[in-house]
Image: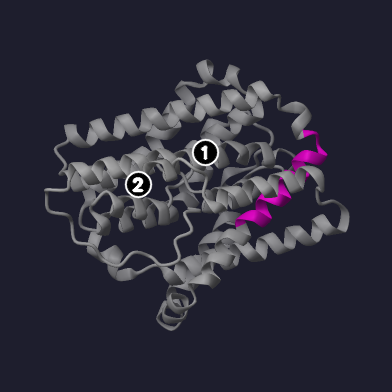
Amino acid sequence: MARSRLLPDNFTLYLVTTVVLASLLPASGRFAQALEVATTVAVSLLFFLHGAKLSRQAIVAGIGHWRLHLVVVASTFVLFPLLGWALRPVLQPLVTRDLYTGILFLCALPATVQSAIAFVSMARGNIPAAVCSASASTLLGVAFTPLVVGLLLTQNAAMGDPLDAMGRIGLQLLLPFIVGHLLRPWLAGFLQRRASVMKVVDQGSILLVVYAAFSHAVIDGLWTQVPLSALAGLLVVCAVLLGLVLTITTWSARRMGFSKEDEITIVFCGSKKSLVSGVPMANVLFAANVAGAIVLPLMLFHQMQLMVCGVLAQRYARRTADSPAAPKPALPKGDTRAG
C-alpha cells in the first residue's frame, strides 16, 4: 500500500504528457489566442463547480475550532513565505532565477481541498475542521496570494500590480465560486450523480492552462534556459521546503497541546499547496513567457506532497488505531487528488 503511494498517480502522468506535448508542439498564432479564451472559460467553470460542490454544513461543523484554523492559515500564508524568503540565499543557487520565483509563488498559494481532506480521513483526523480550513484557505488565497507574492517579488518585472491581479483573480475565480455556491441547492444533486463531469472539468482545465503556459515558455526558450542540474536542484529545494513545513507544523501542534486528531489536520492542511488554484493564478499574475517556469516547481511539489503525505497518513492511521477518531462527515465526491 505504501509503495503504491510512492508511484505517480494518473493525473501526474497526464501533466507530464501535457508538458511533453507543449514542448514538441507548442501552441502559437491564432491557436494560442483561441487556447487563451478556452482556458479562461474552463477555469471559471472549474471554480463555479467547486463552489457548487462545497458543503455549507461541513464548514459550519468545523468553523468553531478557531485556534486550529489560525495555525493552518499561519502555516499556509506566513510560514511557507518566510521559509522561501529566508532560504533564498542558500537554495536559489541550486536552480535558475525563474524557477526560484516559482518556488516563492508556490509558498504564497492556498492549501488544497480534496487531497488534504482525503489524507486527514485516511489518518483518522478531524475531518470537519479539515473541510473548513482547506475551504477557507482557498477563499483567502484570492486576496492573500497576490499580496504575499507582491511582497516576495518586489523587484520582479514579470509580475504586475498585486491589487490589479487580485481584482482579476476575484473576477475569474472567486466570482464563479460564489455564484456556484449560491446555486448549490439546485446543482449539488446533479454533481453527486455526475462525479465524472467534475473530474473532467477539474483535470481538463488544469491541463489546458499547463499546455498554454508551457507553450509560451517553450517558444521563448524555456528548455534552453533550464539545465538538468537546475531540475535536480529543484527536486532538492522542494524536498527541503516540504520537510521543514511538515516538521514545524507537527512540532507546533504538539507544543500547543492539540489532540492527535487536530495535529493530523494541522499537518495535512498546513503543508499542502493547491495545483487547482496555483496554475490559474500563475496565468493571471505572471507574464506568459515566464508562466511555464513559474508552475514547474508547483507541479513537482504537488507530486512530492502526495507521495510523502500518503506514507505519513498511513503511519498516523497505525498510531491512532486504538484511539477514538473524530466524527467523519461524507467526503467530497470525485476527488481527483489534483488539488
Residue at the location (23% across, 62% down)? 328
Question: How many marks overall?
Answer: 2
Residue type indicated by callout 1: Leu
The vertical placement of 84 against 63, above or below, is above
Q: Is residue 67 visible?
A: no
Q: Magenta part mainly helix, strand or loop?
A: helix
Residue at the right extreme?
Answer: 29
**The quarter of the displayed image where residue 242 is located:** top left
Q: Which region is colored magenta?
A: 206-221
How far is the residue under mark 1 from the one under mark 2?
15 Å
Q: Is residue 8 visible?
A: yes
Give SS at disc 2: helix
Residue at the left extreme?
Answer: 323
Residue 48 relative to residue 254: left or right? right
Which of these two is toward me, 281 or 267?
267
Specify the label residue 224 is tagged with.
none
Which of these two is toward me, 315 or 210?
315
Residue at the location (14% across, 38% down)? 257
Place of residue 97 in the rendered image (x, y in percent of width and height, measured from the top left): 65, 25
Residue at the location (55% across, 53% down)? 10
Q: What residue does disc 1 label?
A: 106
Q: What residue does disc 2 label?
A: 269
Which of these two is toward me, 161 or 25?
25
Residue type indicated by callout 2: Cys
The vertical placement of 46 against 286, above or below, is below
Check residue 212 for magenta coloring.
Answer: yes
